[in-house]
Image: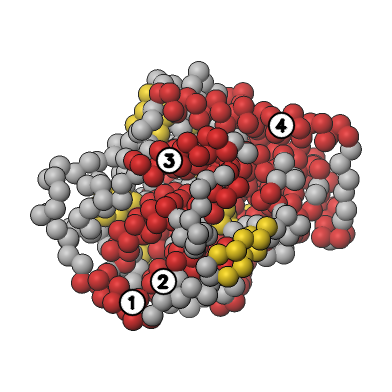
């Protein structure tokens, strides 16, 4: 295939000398460029953030072409919640304090609204946990027991208490959607995707370690273990599973949409919670991925039972994978795959949702780019590991493309078609939570989130002395950073195991009720299901219904 850029071909030669042993220096001109791009990234954030606050708040998202708002995932003021910790990362503590107050006053975990369990976890609970752990950096008044106590943490717990009702199944794997007030409807489909089962251990593990209540971590691990037990004899998992029976209803295995964050959370959960068993499980999956899905330096979709390729496509969501490879030390493979993905970006100025590698063409009806973060996310991780200045230049090119093609009067718009750069009237909350944040971290190598321990602070609490901010921050799949040292600080705070047992009884005895609150259920403008069950004869269509955020 003759589609690779000159830079990629040069890299292939270079990688023969194990990039993990390389060292790089940044000259003054590049340092000056970094300074400029840090400011450009701040400008990008505030253009979108101010547009949302002026035209869309308190609705979930900004519609950047018409400059108005819409509810999408649950009437949460979702963009505000998702952007809260980004304010702290940018150093805007005044706005962080203001928004924290707004969130605490207005965010209601008992709304009569149908929600995605997955999205509520990664965006709302993840965002609240992260903001809670960053609140000391921005001068919020802290309770004596902080970081093991605090109002933002308490609100995250309230949301967790609502969505754990979705885990009351025969297998322990959760339903995909529920009503926050009423619980899981008896008519709710038992079919959901792999990621919607395996993407809870970071948030739920953090809640258990911070509060001392083991319930949340146990529930997440039970779901993970149940999912892992359903893998095929060759070690692959499919895309959609019946959470009551454990039977696969969509058998296509891949690393992209509907599956991706399951693998991500095995690696990150192992690091955050010091759980070696999770890394062992990931290593087993990676072995099967490399054997059956990896074709050269691409990753295709395959039948989970036979391992035969079913779809020779690249999805933009798969661009998270080089970041995971970097975290697990496989830098050579990360480099090679990243440059393949960047070659697709170079062709269009952004990555389409689906790209046919065998035809070197965009897949029809999957031409869009909703300002996803995954490619710059992996660039950030790989740059942090190697300090290769070429990665900075890649990030700058991606930034410039978004700035040129997606900017509107009041925000940044989804690209409807990467071939002609036509735009669509949506700006997802993850643009401010993830995409802009990863740009800023790439261009700000001295940011506190890159700390390796030299900036740790000591805090005395009723639970003992805490060393905080010692480095090793773990980002959830919505780019909300979690400080592992805070979890360790609170780990001595445990409760009687009987409390967790009793709580599990509540989960499994819960009944859906129509007797509480208004009969009117708020319905978001888009489906609350993370990955609704597709027609089994339309594989390409069903992959398009799912997304990693």
- Using residue 60 as the reference point, say whether residue 93 is left or right of it: right
Point out residue 484 in the picture as x, y percentages from the top left corner. 59, 63
Q: Residues within 10 Å of mark 4 (few under 14, many from 20)?
A: many
**How far apart are labels 1 and 4 at the CA level?**
50 Å
Residue holding disc 2: 213
* On screen, residue 127 above or below 17: above
Point out residue 374 in the picture as x, y percentages from the top left corner. 58, 46
Determine contact: label 2, label 1, CB under 8 Å. yes
Determine the residue positioned at 22% across, 47% down.
Answer: 112
Instruction: Tell me if I can see residue 456 in this picture.
Output: yes
Q: Earlier in the sequence, mark 3 or mark 2?
A: 3
Which tag is nearer the camera, tag 3 or tag 1? 3
Instruction: Tell me if I can see residue 337 in this picture.
Output: no
Circle 1: element type: helix
Which tag is nearer the camera, tag 3 or tag 4? 3
**How far apart are labels 4 and 2 at the CA level?**
43 Å
């Amino acid at each position: 295939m003759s589609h690779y850029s000159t830079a990629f071909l040069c890299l292939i030669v270079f990688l023969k000398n194990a990039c993990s042993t390389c060292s790089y220096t940044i000259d003054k001109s590049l340092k000056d460029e970094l300074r400029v791009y840090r400011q450009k990234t701040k400008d990008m954030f505030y253009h979108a953030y101010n547009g949302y606050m002026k035209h869309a708040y308190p609705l979930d998202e900004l519609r950047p072409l018409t400059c108005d708002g819409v509810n999408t995932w649950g009437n949460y003021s979702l963009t505000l919640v998702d952007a809260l910790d980004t304010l702290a990362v940018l150093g805007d503590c005044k706005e962080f304090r203001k928004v924290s107050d707004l969130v605490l006053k207005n965010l209601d975990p008992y709304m009569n609204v149908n929600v995605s369990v997955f999205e509520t976890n990664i965006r709302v609970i993840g965002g609240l946990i992260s903001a809670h752990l960053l609140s000391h950096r921005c001068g919020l008044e802290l309770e004596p027991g902080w970081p093991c106590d605090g109002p933002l943490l308490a609100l995250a717990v309230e949301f967790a208490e609502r969505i754990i009702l979705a885990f009351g199944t025969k297998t322990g794997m959760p339903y995909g959607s529920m009503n926050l007030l009423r619980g899981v409807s008896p008519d709710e489909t038992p079919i959901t995707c792999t990621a919607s089962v395996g993407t809870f251990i970071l948030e739920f593990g953090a809640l258990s370690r911070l509060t001392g209540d083991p319930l949340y971590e146990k529930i997440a691990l039970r779901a993970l273990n149940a999912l892992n037990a359903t893998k095929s004899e060759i070690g692959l998992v499919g895309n959609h599973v019946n959470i009551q029976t454990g039977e696969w209803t969509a058998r296509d295995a891949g690393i992209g949409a509907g599956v991706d964050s399951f693998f991500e959370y095995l690696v990150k959960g192992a690091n955050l919670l010091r759980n070696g068993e999770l890394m062992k499980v990931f290593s087993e999956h990676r072995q099967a991925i490399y054997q059956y899905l990896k074709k050269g330096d691409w990753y295709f979709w395959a039948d989970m039972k036979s391992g035969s390729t079913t779809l020779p496509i690249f999805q933009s969501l798969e661009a998270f994978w080089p970041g995971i490879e970097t975290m697990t030390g496989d830098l050579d493979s990360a480099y090679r795959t990243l440059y393949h993905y960047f070659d697709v970006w170079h062709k269009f100025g952004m990555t389409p949702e689906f790209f046919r590698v065998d035809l070197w063409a965009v897949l029809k009806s999957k031409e869009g780019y909703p300002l996803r973060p995954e490619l710059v996310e992996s660039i950030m991780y790989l740059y942090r590991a190697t300090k290769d200045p070429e990665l900075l230049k890649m990030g700058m090119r991606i930034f410039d493309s978004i700035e040129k093609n997606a900017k509107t009067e009041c925000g940044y718009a989804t690209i409807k078609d990467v071939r002609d750069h036509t735009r669509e009237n949506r700006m997802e909350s993850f643009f401010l939570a993830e995409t802009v944040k990863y740009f800023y971290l790439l261009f700000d190598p001295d940011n506190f989130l890159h700390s390796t321990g030299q900036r740790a602070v000591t805090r005395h609490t009723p639970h003992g002395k805490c060393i905080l901010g010692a480095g090793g921050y773990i980002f959830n799949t919505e780019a909300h950073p979690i400080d592992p040292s805070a979890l360790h600080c609170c780990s001595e705070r445990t409760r009687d195991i009987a409390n967790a047992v009793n709580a599990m009884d509540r989960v499994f005895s819960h009944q859906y009720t129509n007797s509480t609150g208004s009969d009117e259920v708020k319905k978001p403008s888009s489906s609350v299901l993370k990955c609704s069950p597709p027609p089994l004869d339309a594989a390409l269509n069903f992959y398009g219904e799912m997304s990693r955020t």
